[in-house]
Amino acid sequence: MSDALIVRGVHKTYNGRSVPTPALRGVDLEIEAGTFTCIVGPSGHGKSTLLHLLGGLDRPSAGAVHAFGEDLSKMSDARLARFRAERVGFVFQFFNLLKGLDVTENVSMPMMLAGRSPREQRDRAADLLASVGLSEKAHARPSELSGGQMQRVAIARALANDPEALMLDEPTGNLDSVSEAEVLAILDELHSAGRTIVMVTHSPEIAARAERVVEVRDGLIA
Amino acid sequence: MNDYRLVLRNLFGSRSRFALTLTGITVGITALVVMMSLGGGLRAQIERQATDLGANLIVTPKGWCAYEQVKVLSGNQLPDAIPPDEVAAIEAIDGVTVLPYLTVGSAIDNEPVPVTGVRVAETVAAKRWSVAEGEIPAAGEHGVLAGAAIAESFALAPGDSLTLRGTPFTVRGVMASTGTGDDGVLFIPLDVAQEVYETSGRVSFLAVSVADLSAVDLYAQRITDAANVAVISDRQLLASVLSVVDSVGTTLTVIAAVAVLTAAFGIINTMLMATLERRREIGILKSLGSTNARVFRVFMLEAAAYGVIGGVVGLVVGTAASHIITPLIAANEFTAFVGGARVSALPPLSDMLAILIGAVAVSTASGLYPAWRAARLAPVEAISYE
Ligand SMILES: Nc1ncnc2c1ncn2[C@@H]1O[C@H](COP(=O)(O)OP(=O)(O)OP(=O)(O)O)[C@@H](O)[C@H]1O
Ligand SMILES: [Mg+2]
């Protein structure tokens, strides 16, 4: 199998207000296409940072990130944005739905950003919401949903442009066990359909379901 | 979804913020429209008045300034300053026709009204006034010829009695509208005015027409030789009065500009607040693949929308306000061109269009910095924490 994601000698230092924080200190990592990988490790040791770099949400301070044959560190801001729109989908712990928009509009947003027609947006949003079991909430506001429902909307949104990889940062961190099970079931389904999945988690049980577990400790792969 | 719907959602997402910002812009534009129509109204009024003076030269006491010259055109009260012997000396000059004016004041129902003593028949003829109702009061008679506007305000009709400076008068006639300040004046025979107001035969100023227009300067010279007075041509009077009006206009424009500037800072402030409030939203949009340019565009569109909506609302409110405010302002002594000034001159359509374009330009410019800030926002900082 080919490597979907390749990280080479990546450093990431945040230039905060006071002192620069080294979050990653020389990471090398390959992730094969179609695999389900979990990133684990203690809090504050660089898991989210690594996930952001893998999905082109941020740029490394040094080193290179290749995704699906493209060198993210060489891309312009605009191309990197396009990469995020089309080739990866992010899901976050705190859902990050757009509060002013309804569920369908939230799911449509990545398609709008990718330049798809309103008709396409509507049709696909309806399909995606059906696939996560939320057809009846199509016109609800995020504030009217439970945490589990919001996270399913977020997953539908991440899949809007049919990306190669799904990046999830503690997607069940704020969910009860029933919602967690629902989300994990959806992920299993996506994985069996061949999608590359990278998920940060604190839960050993969840990590146990993954094909591969990568531990990040002190800014390095342990 | 498209960008425009996103902009609309943003605009109306926070109603109070939207309302506040819009109020700022609307006030600015309203002020601008009122100021412009007020300035324009005065100017139009004065020009009409000056051409209707029916005189080539105005004879005034020495030392009058523009402020008093304005009153020549407005019909407001002026000191009685030219004594009878000087009037006679000027009238004796060959080739001049003199119309003396004694501008005084009285009150009806406690409201001040301008009263002017003139040689009624001669003045009516020279100014080509037409009498709508009744007749012209004769010299020596306690009779009033009322301007159209003032007759309407106080419901005056021929035969009505009124008291001017404690003396009973009878309304003899009501004029047809002239479209000038004369519409707001009560005219009484000069000799009666001099007696009732005890001016010992003095008058306020003289309107002089000359037989030979090409020799206006020569006549002016003869008048100043004959009497201790100042002479100003109708053109000079107009220019001098307009210079005052224009300086007032400039002041009004500065006030309006300040109002617009305030509105601009309102937009900048709102948009910066919005950038802060929407940090997370911007971060989410970027994580979903929005380019910086797109974030920039959405914010700029929002700023421009404020300009369009604020501009239109401001024009409407401003137009309405100028209809209400102008007469109020016109009711004070400086701008008592009452008759006609009650109708303000609205800025012409081209000016309104310019105001609208200006509003959009100002709000768009105000949006630049906040939009740039929003576009530059790093997504990771905004989305990671609740
Ligand atoms: N935007 C930022 N600015 C400054 N420092 C940051 C920023 N994001 C993360 N850091 C720092 O970088 C380090 C790694 O953070 P990261 O979020 O990657 O940790 P994590 O492993 O995801 O932790 P957690 O399990 O708590 O989510 C931490 O010390 C954190 O404080
Ligand atoms: Mg994290």
Image (cartoon, coloured by chain):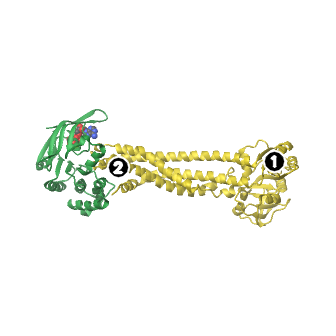
Chain colours: A green, B yellow
Q: Does any atom of ligand 1 lie closer than 8 Å to the CB of label 2?
A: no
Query: In screen coordinates, is B357 left or right of A208?
Result: right
Count numbered badges in the picture.
2
Name the secondary structure under disc 2. helix
Pinpoint residue B181: horizontal percent, then vertical percent: 71, 56
Query: In screen coordinates, is B6 left or right of B115?
Result: left
Q: Which mark is residue B322?
A: none
Q: Chain of mark 2?
A: B
Q: Which picture quadrant has residue B218? A: top right
Dot 1 amino acid type = Ala
Query: In screen coordinates, is A7 left or right of B19?
Result: left
Quadrant where the image shows the N terminus of chain B: bottom left
Farthest residue to the front: give it.
B214
Q: Is residue B213 above or below residue B176?
A: above
Pinpoint residue A207: horizontal percent, then vertical percent: 13, 47
Query: In screen coordinates, is A116 left or right of B128?
Result: left
Residue drawn 20% across the image and 49% down it:
A168
Residue drawn 29% across the image and 43% down it:
A76
Dot 2 amino acid type = Arg
Q: Does any atom of ligand 1 lie closer than 8 Å to the CB of label 1?
A: no
Residue assigned mark 1: B215
How far apart, in angstroms, are the residues tagged by discs 1 and 2?
Answer: 73 Å
How crowded is the residue under tag 2: few (<14 C-alpha within 10 Å), some, or many (20+)?
Answer: some
Residue drawn 67% across the image and 45% down it:
B243
Residue assigned mark 2: B294
Does the image show residue B5? yes
